[in-house]
Each structure stands twice: as structure tokens, then as C-alpha cells.
Image (cartoon, rainbow, N blue to C red):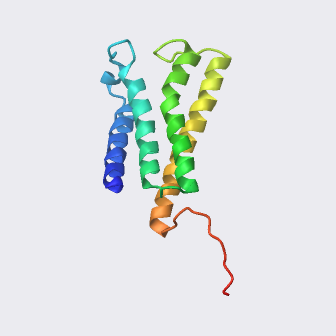
Amino acid sequence: MPKLIALLLLALSALSIGTLVSGTSYSEWLLPGGLPLGNALAAAGLCFLAGAAFLLSPPSSIRRRVCRAALVSAILWLPVSIALAGNLELNFSGSRGTAWLVASSVTAIAVLSSLLWAAAGLLFGSSGKSSSIRAAG
């Protein structure tokens, strides 16, 4: 069941990110409260990708813990961005813009890396747990 939910999250992420990449005009629509739809789609796309990576990772594994950290980072991306910008439109100037660019890049790399690691674990059958070598007694 988690793999099916992960697949749904990947599809939702593709829809969110695809909408942003296509440059549709409705990404500038304001949601109730004043947040632009495009900013919500960017945050949702990151969270969906990180959530899929989390679900595809084996429970109690190092991979799952790393994916959880990437998920938390994705969830915090929008609030931190708004705090850095001081506005919902995410208009930046000066060093705050540079800090936001670095934080956004690190978050995106963490999310994509965790998804690739989770997918590689599925493809190659790795459990993600550290193994120990036992001597035959």
C-alpha cells in the first residue's frame, strides 16, 4: 500500500511541478490569505517528492531517517521562505535573496537525492540497514 501512495504522490508532484514549468498564468492567482498559487504548488511539489521517498524507504533504516529529514526540510521550505522574504510573494533583495537561494537549492537537492536513494534501494533490493558480518561458529 505505501508504494501505491508513493506513486500517487509522485503523480501529484509531477502535476505541481509541471504546472510551474509550463508557465501558466493561473500560477499567479492569489489564494485566500494572499499566497500565490505558484508558491503553494512549489511547496507541494517538494513535499510530495519527499513524502514519496519516505514511503519508499524501509522502516527503521538509515535511508528512512534521511528521507524524513528531507521531508521536514520540504515542509519547512515555504514558511522559511516567507520569513526570509517578509512577504507571501517571495520577493527578495540583497543577502536575504542569496540566503533563500542557498536554502532552496539545498532543500531541492536533499529531496531529489533522497528520492533517488529510495528508488535505487527498490531497484537493487537494498534494505538500507547496516549489515554485520558474522563468523560461522
Residue drawn at (56%, 49%), measured in percent from left and top?
65
30 up-or-down from 50: above or below: above
State left or right for residue 118 relative to residue 130: left
Q: Which one is nearer the viewer's eye here, 122 or 101? A: 122
The count of marks equals: 0
Locate residue 130, reporting x and y percent: 62, 64
Locate residue 62, reporting x and y percent: 58, 55
Q: Residue furthest front?
A: 137
Q: Which one is nearer the viewer's eye here, 50 or 13? A: 50
The quadrant of the picture occupied by the N terminus is bottom left
Residue 113 visible in the shown view: no
Residue 10 visible in the shown view: yes
77 up-or-down from 122: above or below: above
Locate residue 22, reporting x and y percent: 35, 34
Q: Which one is nearer the viewer's eye here, 68 or 116? A: 68
The quadrant of the picture occupied by the C terminus is bottom right
Residue drawn at (36%, 12%), measured in percent from left and top?
33
Residue drawn at (65%, 71%), measured in percent from left and top?
132
Residue drawn at (37%, 41%), measured in percent from left and top?
13
